[in-house]
Amino acid sequence: MTRRSVVNLACLGSRAVTLLYKNSPRPLHISLCNSSSQPKAGFKPEKVAVVTKTTRYEFEQQRYRYAGLSEEDLKQLLAMKGSSYSGLLERHNIHTNNVEHIVRSLRREGIEVRVVKRGEYDEEVVRWADAIISAGGDGTMLLVASKVLSKDKPVVGVNTDPERSEGHLCLPVRYTRAFPEALEKLFRGDFRWLWRQRIRLHLEGTGINPTPVDLHEQQLSLEQHNQAHRITTMDSQRRTGTLHESFSKPSLLPIRSLNEIFIGESLSSRASYYEISVDDGQWEKQKSSGLSICTGTGSKAWSYNINKLAEQAVEEVLRIGKSQMGLDFPLNREFIEKVTDEYNESLVFSPEDQRLLFSIREPIVNRVFSSSRQRGFASKVCVRSRCWDACMVVDGGTSFEFNDGAIATISMSEEDQLRTVVLEN
């Protein structure tokens, strides 16, 4: 006999719509409905994976340990670079103590816990866990989310260094120290689910290599980045026994993007040459500083900073408009701030929105290259590379080769939603 888990998806007045999942390995007691007319159902997982970030202290240790540097040598080297050894160690200890606090809190509730470093986090860990806690900042949360392909597996972010990290994707910072209180709210259903839409990627074309280079744990120079891509390409060829595949079938990459996809030349000073089709429209040749495609979650991140206007620019445009049209309105600071804020706020949209926002960075427009829209919403974006040495980067941490002949289809699917938790302060 199969066991079933019940998920309350939505509330219609005092009634709930219920979906039954068959062949679930264990019951998940979850509810999306916190209506006063409905009893609140909590969520208490049996197995939780805690994925921890690599601190700067750990990174520097790993980076220089192979060279035979002692701890004292590392102190001197960091001092020469203007970094404080004691400061890095202090931040490392704060992170470590907060991770231990999370683990103790979970185990006190009888939950089986598996602590995993970022480099050890893989699909097997995802399969094992009922829920996953990202212990770090937004970067760790993005990495954790990228490998969770099921929308029924909750991911919770905890900011383990709230004094030095913003943590937009994490629980409010008070729950870092008050984590047992966060657990109590989860158990009794005093929270709501936030279903964040994500991007999926199909890759096809000539000479593609769907093997990624992981940038999360590395700080690569341009030459190192190019070499890493060459190594993964050769490894892929050795495994398959083939040279570059031509006109391969579209391949769905086993990764989902929570924030954004960026496509462009690895050397930022070189213009990116590509063709783009929006919602199955005509292909358009473009040259620019690259292409960003974001979700509602990512609309507050890089995309926002690409497109936002500064008060100085708004003031200059308003001044020209006032002069050209002979209008009479005050250009005081309050008015300029209001116009700027209203424009910039229009760039942000809901994480649950099923639309993509594409942004073309610094488009080159001339007789050969055009840009009908520098920014816009879409359901699907197709990009054909005409680049020399380009990459497609997912959430700033996973890089795929994207050179001449490669084609990416960027879209959303309801099944790719990420289940996250919202707790009020």
Image (tube, grey):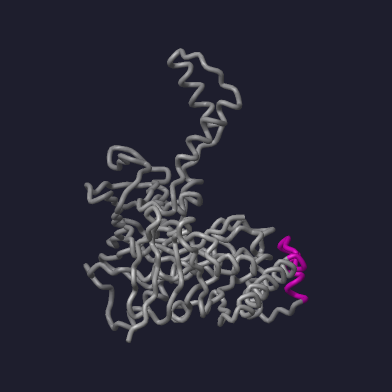
Residue 232 in view here: yes
- Which of 325 and 71 lies nearest the eye of the viewer? 325
**Along the line of sight, which residue is nearer the eye, 321 or 162?**
162
**In magenta segment, residue 73:** yes
* x and y, in percent, of residue 117 in the image: 57, 77
User: Which residue is at a point 36% across and 59% down the rendered structure image?
Assistant: 388
> Is 146 or 155 nearer to us in this picture?
155
In the rendered image, residue 30, in percent from the top left (x then y), is placed at 45, 68
In depth, the one of 8 and 153 nearer the eye is 8
Q: Is residue 71 left or right of residue 26?
A: right
> Most extreme residue toward the bottom, as rendered?
1
Find out whether residue 164 is within the magenta segment: no
Residue 58, percent from left and from top:
65, 73
Residue 236: x, y in percent?
35, 78
Q: Provide the residue span drawn in magenta.
A: 72-87
Q: Is residue 223 visible?
A: no
